[in-house]
Image (tube, rainbow, N blue to C red):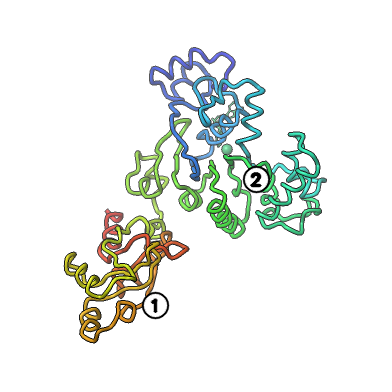
Amino acid sequence: MFSKKPQKALSLLKNGASKHEVLEKTGQNVGLYNINFDIYEGEIFVIMGLSGSGKSTLLRCINRLINPTDGHILIDGDDIATASSEELREIRRQKLGMVFQNFALIPHRSVLDNVAYGLEIQGVSKEERYENAMEAIETVGLKGYESSKTSQLSGGMQQRVGLARALATDPDILLMDEAFSALDPLIRSEMQDELLALEDKMQKTIVFISHDLDESLKLGDRIMIMNDGYIAQIGTAEEILTNPADDYVSKFVAGVDRSKIFTAEAVMKRAEPVVSINSGLKVALQLMREHGISSIFVVARDKTLKGIITVDAAVEGLKQNKTLQEVMVEDIPVAHPDTPLNELIPIIENTSPLPVASEDNKLRGIIVRGSVLGALAIEEV
Ligand SMILES: Nc1ncnc2c1ncn2[C@@H]1O[C@H](COP(=O)(O)OP(=O)(O)O)[C@@H](O)[C@H]1O
Ligand SMILES: [Mg+2]
């Protein structure tokens, strides 16, 4: 509640009143209400909503730049809402980093000193803070710019400095309030890609505010859509697109090109059965017969994808006393878990089933033609 005397409003809210009704009856502005949710360790949790829906207020409650009037905010079991100022300082220091939309840098300071700032106010020695800051500067791709003044940098580079400053203290949780909204579209998209790449390496928990649907769908492991101070829906991109909770969410997601959102991972099935590269052709044939399939993927013991064998090639190879490795076709198309469905459609026309493998070529699943078209068809309804 943005009010010094919130009691009446709080009891109205507890009895089910909306933000609008509270405003009418008390003249007081409700920041947030009915907010109850979890953020999982290591995920990118996107908070999306129209301007004024309460996104920034919520984020600022998490590090208590805003004091919540009521309720609890637990980080690893510690309640931020009731923490003493000493406890709060400690939690902020160890666990929380924040990146702002307007970068919030100190213009006459060098990149290095901006990045080291968080450590400086924590009283970390010069040597140690410069060492950590240099590491963060390298992480965000600004090596070589450490002595430049931030006012001399482009917007994209300034936001890299903002990100490096948050990373320098190595927080578990990064809070990012519309961190990319002020950037040009191309730079913005580049920064999104880099954040995803960074997240793959760092595995931090990121709470990312955006009012942009495309950005939210691209970045969010899960997305929370806010409306007028309450949670309209929480879910994965797929869940929100397939099953919008109300009209507000429906309007938000209308017009999204679904084939760009639905990915290989979303439609793949378990790769079962597979045959080991150390097996013989007889085993491969038997597995195909048992499961009524006409081809089978070959994997190493660690699930690395090696190739595919068709039933015809296996029968022929057996006659000629060939080994499984001689018969196997190695050079096959492979989808990545993140490959969007619209890119899969032309491939799946000619290659079904299509293997889905991770970056290190481990087999994650398979896609058959029907499931791609099925997923797209459901979305048309
Ligand atoms: N300091 C404040 N005092 C009074 N009302 C505020 C204050 N900050 C935000 N609000 C109100 O809280 C609501 C949510 O604002 P905000 O969290 O900034 O939304 P968003 O970040 O989604 O645009 C708005 O109605 C806004 O006017
Ligand atoms: Mg905001």
**Percent of width and height locating residue 239:** 35, 46
User: Looking at this view, is 2 or 270 the one in front?
Assistant: 270
Amino acid at dot 2:
Leu
Taking the spot 29% from the left edge, 56% from the top edge, the residue there is: 380
Left or right, residue 101 beside residue 343? right
Taking the spot 67% from the left edge, 50% from the top edge, the residue there is: 159
* Residue that badge 1 annotates: 331
Are there few (<14), some (14-19), or many (20+) residues within 10 Å of tag 1?
Answer: few
Q: Can residue 208 be seen in this view?
A: no
**Percent of width and height locating residue 213:** 47, 49
Task: Give the number of marks.
Answer: 2
Say which element carries label 1. Answer: loop
**Percent of width and height locating residue 61:** 57, 29
- Of callouts 2 and 1, the N-terminal one: 2
Quadrant in the picture for residue 344: bottom left
- Image height check: is 316 above or below 364? below
- Image height check: is 296 above or below 73? below
Amino acid at dot 1:
Asp
Are there few (<14), some (14-19), or many (20+) residues within 10 Å of tag 2?
Answer: many
* Residue that badge 2 annotates: 167
Taking the spot 65% from the left edge, 29% from the top edge, the residue there is: 90
